[in-house]
Amino acid sequence: MLRKTTLLMLCALTLSCSAFAQEAWSLQKCISHAKQNNLSLRQSQIAVSQAELTEKGSRMARMPSLNASTNLGFQYGRNIDPTTNDFVNTRIGFNNWRVNADAPIYNGGAIKNTIKQSEFDLEAAKEDANTQFQNIALQMASAYLSILLAKEQVTIAQRAISQTQEQLSTIDKRINAGTVPKADRLDILAQIARNEQTLIQAENSVAINYLTLKNILELEPEYDLEIIIPNELMQIQENVNVTDLPTVFNQAMNTQASIKASEARMKSAELSVPIAKADLLPSVSAFAGLDTRFSNASLFQSDPYFDQLDNNFGQNLGIQVNIPIYNKHRASINIERARLDIINAEVQNKQAKQQLKADVQTAIANARAAKLELAASERSLEAANAAFDNAQKRYDLGAINTLELTTAKTNLDTAALNVARAKYDYIFRLKIIDFYMGKDLNLN
């Protein structure tokens, strides 16, 4: 019985551990999570919702309005009895009921143009949200790749420590054999210390970049986050030629949300002029109403409350025309202000396009430079590796001392770290190109 109970507890524990096992996060999962939880993105979605409400309100302006009102009060002194229209000099209690309706017929196209304008404003708000999302995704790709770089630097540092410890073991054997002086051991120990320092720096870099990623994801610092390390990260980057400026820029013009938002705002501004001009035109609306009233002055004539409401019931129906004559130049000022808004929107649109072109040029230049840097660092690594192999052979023959050997090893370790930095920098620069060309950010 005890064995059976123990077995059940172990099974339950195993299932529990499986249920709470931390799933590794891909870049796509990070981006998807941030889209739902990042506070900046949530704020941009609120702005979209507000624009949707404004657009809905603009459409509702076409609908008729219906309102009811009532009042209850007393009149003192000389007044007109509201039920008989006679002058009386007494306190009168009164109660009025009204229902009014009105509907717009013509207002110079203001409602129609306001609806169109609110549609463009809604489009701009959506593209602003997309711009925010694109920027967050790019920041996340940077943080993700920084973690991958730091992890690779940890691996390089650990390998360097292992290799140097093997050298220390060899040196100890030679010291014991009397073939090298004891002082040579100090050079190897110094090399191990340098490698351990590099390892600590790389591990700190991993932790810091994880915190950066968690901050973007709106995760708690203590959350156990682990990212997926692609198995073939660099193979997908081989033989990649950076695209020319016209190709990338034309793609960016069609895919960048910031440009779409700017275009929408320019169209919205263009509608401000006809909306302002509508204030110079007559407006026509229909109206209708129902009303009735009660006065306690009629109670002395045996006229009860509901009988008075029935007897005083009235209706009205008609059309109202408002003709603007002089309104302190309000309409003309608004027209000029609308024209300035158009000019400002056009300038901002041109600035956005110029900035995009400059950003694309910079991105292409950085990608080309990163590609050359990677190639140069790989050649440097090959040279450092060959130099270390040669130094090891010469050291074995007694042609150089331990310090010269450790110097060659330090150069090799530095070259390996430089290759890792150049590799991930090149990948990130390519991801920026993908970003401007409207491609999904992924590492697969």
Image (tube, grey):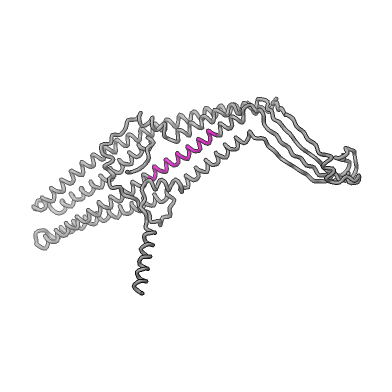
The residue located at (35%, 67%) in the rendering is: 10
Say left or right for 347 vs 304.
left
Say which quarter of the image contains residue 371.
top left
Say left or right for 265 vs 190.
right
Q: Is residue 138 magenta?
A: yes
Seen as rendered, the residue at the extreme bottom is: 1
Quarter of the rendering occupied by the N terminus: bottom left
Q: Is residue 230 magenta?
A: no
In this view, the residue in front, 201 or 434, is 434
The residue located at (53%, 36%) in the rendering is: 122
Relative to 19, residue 329 above or below: above
- Stretch of the chain drawn in magenta: 119-140
Quarter of the rendering occupied by the C terminus: top left
In this view, the residue in front, 230 or 202, is 230
Say which quarter of the image contains residue 424.
top left
Picture coordinates of residue 66, whole percent (x, y): 70, 38
Picture coordinates of residue 290, whole percent (x, y): 77, 37
Say left or right for 173 vs 264.
left
Picture coordinates of residue 271, whole percent (x, y): 56, 28
Relative to 271, residue 186 above or below: below
Picture coordinates of residue 247, whole percent (x, y): 35, 30
Say left or right for 301 vs 104.
right
Magenta span main SS: helix
